Each structure stands twice: as structure tokens, then as C-alpha cells.
Amino acid sequence: MNSLALLSCLILCFSVFTNASYKYSYDYTSPPPPPKKSGYPSLPPKKSTFGIGFYSKSCPQAEGIIRKAVFKAVLMNPGFAAGIIRMHFHDCFIRGCDGSVLLDSVPGKETAEKDSPINNPSLRGFGVIDEAKALLEKVCPHTVSCADILAYAARDSAFFVGGIKYDVPGGRRDGRVSLSSEVIQNLPPPFFDAKQLEDNFKAKGLSLDEMVTLSGAHSIGVSHCSSFSNRLYGFNTTHPQDPSLDPRYASFLKNKCPRPMSDTQDDPIVNLDVSSPIHLDNKYYLNLRNHKGLLTSDQTLYESPLTSKLVLNNVKFRSTWTRKFANAMVHMGSIEILTGNKGEIRKNCHFIN
């Protein structure tokens, strides 16, 4: 998609988003049943403290203000959409969707999530959340949480680059703790296989199908070469490169990512989706079928009998994947949330009150 076409698409999307109702709506009052094992996160609380239209009376402009901030950023750089969606995922998988990923490190204490090597410098979109928060504090002081801003911004990002529309419940409150050590303990690394991914998502109350569905977010965004260079060079004693990689795609990647020789050399970036890198769609799954998944954790979804049928269904049924993605994003956005009197409403997303 060229720049002019993207501009036209974004303007049309913003107009449609502003004037139409949401296409997909997740019934947060009847969520999927929780895992039977103890210790798993609880599902969304009652409607009174968490629901669609949460700010309709206290700050009716809230979602519109956030939407405009996201539109402005994505229009300038579509990569912000991928960054914001990824940031929401990283937030929810660590201490739940409490905005802890937005907190800055404090001198004398353990570094915050955002400064973990997994997040820094790869996470982006913090400025978009800051802009929306600053505007909201002028209109509705101390009302809209940073956690909700991030959840709404992720929803808006999915629409502006994928046309995926859905309602997002509000009422999350902001957490007061952010620890970099918890990042690696909770986020799935790029070398996980399908079974490890299933277990990781299950620990957050998400199903196998939701895991495969949410992985479709890798149809946008980029990855550093260091996250997959092991597939290109010295894969194992039998194969110099990962045999599940399409040979021509592997050659393309090697041109982008020279063999790593030292820890100080540059670490280039490559699009996660080789076919439609700035459009959130189901072509990600087609890439997997064609052996062009960038990360081990991508390609394993097609190679594994555990998930291969789900991948093929997502190749065939785009509208079904779109609906499932919307529902899975809302479900993920309810992981271990703080509501009612728990947590706080930060005045500044970088610091606790």
C-alpha cells in the first residue's frame, strides 16, 4: 500500500469510526469459563465497575480524544499502531492490564517493566498515550486511567490499520508496581514452540484458539534480527538454517541480517509480515502456510499439529478471524484488572500519584 492510498484509507477509517457503531461487541458479562486450575486470573468483575460506555457520564469525550490522538500518530507513522497493540499485550501479561508498562523507573528501586531489555528500546507509542492523557486531564481531571487509555488506543489502532471495530469495556484502574524482572517471567519469548505458547496463554486465562488468533497481530510491526538470527545461521548440527523457512525467504532475511559476529554490531529490523506489513489482516497465516513466518514462535503455529488446523482456518475465513481477533483483544484486556477502589487513577502515566 503506497503512502497516498494509506492516507486515503486512514481518513476514511477515521470518518467511519467516528460516525458508526462498533461492528463487533464482546459480551463481558458472559466471558469464556475460567481455567479449572487454581491460581489463574479471575475474569472481568461486575458491570458496575467495568463495562462498555464506562465514561459516558464522567467523561463522555474520553474515547473520542484518545481516538484522535491515535489517528494523528498512525497517520504520521503506521508503525505506531503495531507498537500500541504490542504495548497493550505486554501490559496485560504482566500484573494484568493496569498500565504498569507505562511507569518510569525510579532511582534506588528495581527498574520498571518498560526498561527491561525485552521492552527497551523496542516498545513504542508512549508519546501517543501521553498526549491523550494530557488532553484528558484538561477536560476530565483525574478521571480516565492510563490503563484504559492504552486499551482504547489498542482498539483504535486495530481499526485504523485493519478496519477491525469492537467495543472496549472501561473501568480499569492503574497499578502502582512495575518490575522489569517480571517481564521475562511472563512474556513468551520468540523461540517458544506451540505447546509452550499454549501454556503461557493458558496461564493468563486465554485459550489455544485465542493464542493463535492474537498471534495475527504479527501481521504488522517489526522485529530485530537478533530475535530470529538463530534460524538463519548454525540452526543445528544437521541443518545450517531452519528447514521450516522458505529458502528464498531465508536468503532475503540473510541480506537484511548479516551473521552476528559480536554483541556490539548493529541489530537491524525486519517486517514481521513480508506481504502486508502495515495492514492488520489474515495474510500473516498465509505467510505461515508458505513457510515465511519470521519468528520461531510464528512458524511453529503451522508446523505443530496442535495449531496447524487453526492456522489454516484463519487463512480460509478472514471475517471469522477478524471477529475472533476483536473478541480475543477484549478478553485479553480483562486480565487481572484493578477496579473499584483498587489501584488509582494516575495524574501522569509515568508516575504513581
Image (cartoon, grey):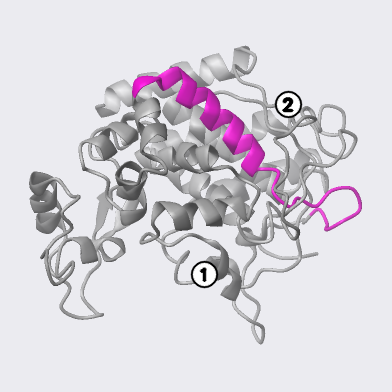
> Is residue 327 magenta-colored?
yes
**Mark 1 crowd level (few <14, some 14–19, many ≥20, 10 Å Cα):** some
> Is residue 119 magenta-colored?
no
Image coordinates for residue 201, horizontal then vertical, percent = 56, 51
- Lateral position of residue 288 relative to residue 67, left or right: left
Quadrant in the picture for the C terminus: bottom right
Instruction: State which quadrant residue 7 falls in.
Output: top left
| Mark 1 secondary-structure assignment | helix
**Mark 2 crowd level (few <14, some 14–19, many ≥20, 10 Å Cα):** some
Q: Which disc, if any, is residue 175? A: none
Q: Is residue 46 above or below residue 177?
A: above
Quadrant in the picture for the N terminus: top left
The residue under the point 73% across, 26% down is 27
Q: Which residues are magenta?
A: 316-345
- Lateral position of residue 87 relative to residue 230, left or right: right
Residue at mark 2 = 27
Q: Is residue 220 visible?
A: no
Image coordinates for residue 120, horizontal then vertical, percent = 45, 67
Instruction: State which quadrant residue 51 falls in.
Output: top right
Q: Amino acid at mark 1?
A: Ile
Image coordinates for residue 50, horizontal then vertical, percent = 82, 38
Residue at mark 1 = 184
